[in-house]
Amino acid sequence: MRTYKRVRLTGVQYFFTVNLAERQNNDQLTRHVDHLRAAFRQTRNDHPFNIDAIVILPEHLHCIWTLPPGDDDYSTRWRLIKARFSMSLTADETISESRKRKGERGIWQRRYWEHCIRNERDYHNHLDYIHYNPVKHGYVQAAKDWPYSSFRQWVQRGMYPENWAASPDIQDYSWE
């Protein structure tokens, strides 16, 4: 069996993409967002980390984390978040034979994608990617309108104008 090797560095931020196993017509993450938030909260209490930015879409999520100094164990955190969220839901999903043999649920894709943030520009590019994602997927016309995102927090910090990533017909041009 081949093992998957992950980059493990301390003192850096990581960008993650995590998907549900069945992405078609699946809205479990937004429909059960309170369960997902509880899974994150409990995991952060047990294994602290900072969520710099996040967007939760119906069937996948993106986020940037900063782990504590000297700590590179994001895989345990993801395992706990996924398990806690899964345990909070009724077991009615399709489960493959492979997963059944391993006693796994069929909610999440087994793997996730991580990227080590290289520099400040890379960090800001990933912030933009996270916050633009609901617009990109057609869920809203402006980033500010998606309720499952850290976008509003970044507006309050002065990183974005409130009308960032809005279609031209709904932008506020009061400065003209």
Image (cartoon, helix red, strand yellow):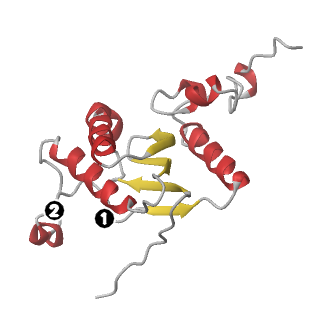
Secondary structure of the residue carrying tag 1 is loop
Q: In which quadrant of the rendered view does residue 12 lie?
A: bottom right
Asked if the residues shown at circle 2 and circle 1 are in contact, with their CB atoms under 8 angstroms apart, the answer is yes
Q: Position of residue 6 (x, y in %)?
A: 44, 73
Q: Which residue is mark 2?
A: 104
Q: In which quadrant of the rendered view does residue 77 lie?
A: bottom left
Q: Is residue 47 above or below residue 103?
A: above
Q: Residue furthest front?
A: 70
Q: Is residue 4 above or below residue 65?
A: below
Q: Nearer the viewer, residue 69 or 138?
A: 69
Secondary structure of the residue carrying tag 2 is loop
Relative side of 128 to 75, left or right:
right
Q: Which residue is mark 1?
A: 110
Q: Position of residue 119 (x, y in %)?
A: 69, 57
Q: Quadrant of the C terminus?
A: top right
- Which of the numbered marks, if any, corresponds to residue 171? none
